[in-house]
């Protein structure tokens, strides 16, 4: 797990305009617990990390730090699917056009490992 978890938790909380009290209420913990996590005195459980990732709209692997490469690929794929699911059709069409530029014909087939 990443050594800077507390710093990430605090940064995300501030970026999302949340107070420690609001985060504590959303996660059903005390504000003191959130303070302790942010200051490196406590670590979040995996379950708590998952809730916090959802609350702050980031992936779990971003919070956790270095993870297994296979899991990271799956997490990236899932994050892309979540983002795309929030797009309207016009945005999806633009995304498809962009992806076609990045993956010209002949290069868009995935290699089996």
Image (tube, rainbow, N blue to C red):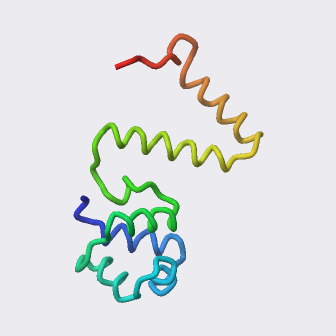
Quarter containing the N terminus: bottom left
- In the figure, is residue 21 to the left or right of 9? right
Q: Which residue is painted at 35% across and 89% down in the image?
A: 32
Choose between 84 and 50: the one closer to the eye.
50
Is 70 located above or below residue 79 in the figure?
above
- In the figure, is residue 37 to the left or right of 55? left
Quarter containing the C terminus: top left
| Residue 103 locus on image (x, y percent) | 54, 21
| Residue 65 locus on image (x, y percent) | 30, 55
Residue lying furthest top in this view?
106
- In the figure, is residue 63 to the left or right of 53? left
Q: How many marks can you see?
A: 0
| Residue 42 locus on image (x, y percent) | 25, 77
Give the quarter of the image for residue 5. bottom left
Is 29 located above or below residue 97 in the figure?
below
Give the quarter of the image for residue 112. top left
Is 29 located above or below residue 63 in the figure?
below
| Residue 50 locus on image (x, y percent) | 42, 62
Q: Which residue is painted at 50% across and 15% down in the image?
A: 107
């Amino acid at each position: 797990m990443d050594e800077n978890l507390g710093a990430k938790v605090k940064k995300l909380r501030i970026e999302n305009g949340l107070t420690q009290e609001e985060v504590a209420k959303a996660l059903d913990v005390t504000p003191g617990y959130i303070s302790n996590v942010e200051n490196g005195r406590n670590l979040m459980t995996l379950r708590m990390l998952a809730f916090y990732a959802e609350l702050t709209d980031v992936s779990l692997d971003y919070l956790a730090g270095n993870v297994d490469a296979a899991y990271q690929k799956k997490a990236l794929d899932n994050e892309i699917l979540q983002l795309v699911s929030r797009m309207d059709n016009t945005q999806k069409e633009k995304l498809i056009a962009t992806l076609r530029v990045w993956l010209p014909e002949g290069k868009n087939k995935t290699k089996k490992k």
